[in-house]
Amino acid sequence: MKQFIQSILGKFGYRITKIREHKEYPNIDILDLVIGDYLKRLDEEFYFIQIGAHDGKWCDPINNYVKRFHWNGLLVEPQPRAFQKLVENYSDQPQLKFENALIFNENRAEVPLYTVHNEGDNDALFQLSYMARLDRDSLFRELSSFGLEEVNSLIEEIRVPSLTIPNLLEKHDFPKLDLLVIDAEGYDFEILKMFDFSKIKPAIIQLEIAHLSIDEKNECFSYLAQNGYRISTVVFDAIGYLQVGGELENPGLGIVELLGRL
């Protein structure tokens, strides 16, 4: 009977599985492995762009690398309060550039952005502001999922300037791009598609995929693969990796092979 039910449900894309107790295990830091592999082959300066940098500390995937290796980079953050903290947190890294703008599909003086209201500079509310996004309803659902009360009163609309990727790159000249990090709360893939890979092609890309639909994720992975990237997904993010020189030395190289040779 169980096999019969499984076969029927399988035709509709469903599967019955036994509920088991969840256990926590240590995770492999794929981004760390990829960056380590890349740095072994790099004999010149490292350049990065981080879009949606927030304050440069809270849940930040590259803060330690930037401070340890003094990478050259551009950090982009639209929220004024977070941007101020971002600049302060990297005040000991004079090689960095900063841009207080929203990356969008057109240049505007003002674009509405929805974030968490924080008049008293509350640390907990400030941390929640990393979820700022273009769609108010999406932010409402996200905050509600945490069980917060009076969610409507927590949401604030702010107006921020916007830039397209071509204009951002024109404003901040980059000789090359080794790492691109995108954390734009659902707008990540749209930003990725703004890059003209015939002009500048990051060796490593990390972008958030948590807010993409299944179809959007598949489209995103196909887009990366078609442009020569090998892909790994890690919790909320996808990591795409070329190798030094712009193309994979071994087209079949994946994360398993990478782990084996580090």
Image (cartoon, rainbow, N blue to C red):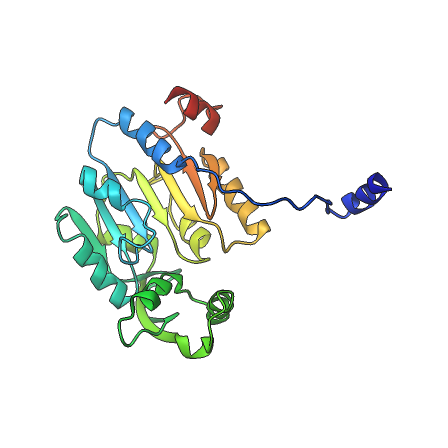
- At 73% from the left and 45% from the top, the residue drawn is 16
Q: Give x and y (percent) for residue 100.
A: 25, 62
Position of 28 relative to 256 (above/below) = below
Position of 146 relative to 242 (above/below) = below
Instruction: Say how many tags the image has.
Output: 0
Q: Give x and y (percent) for residue 64.
A: 25, 43
Tell me if 158 is positioned left or right of 260 in this view: left
Q: Give x and y (percent) for residue 95.
A: 14, 46
- At 25% from the left and 27% from the top, the residue drawn is 42
Tell me if 1 is positioned left or right of 105 in this view: right
Q: In the rendered view of the protein, which quadrant contains the C terminus?
A: top left
Q: Give x and y (percent) for residue 172.
A: 22, 51
- At 77% from the left and 43% from the top, the residue drawn is 10
Residue 31 visible in image: yes
- At 43% from the left and 37% from the top, the residue drawn is 240
- Give 254 or 196, whichever is nearer the viewer: 254
Q: In the rendered view of the protein, which quadrant contains the N terminus?
A: top right
Residue 254 visible in image: no
- Give 99 or 25, whichever is nearer the viewer: 25
Position of 181 relative to 33 (above/below) = below
- Give 185 or 194, whichever is nearer the viewer: 185
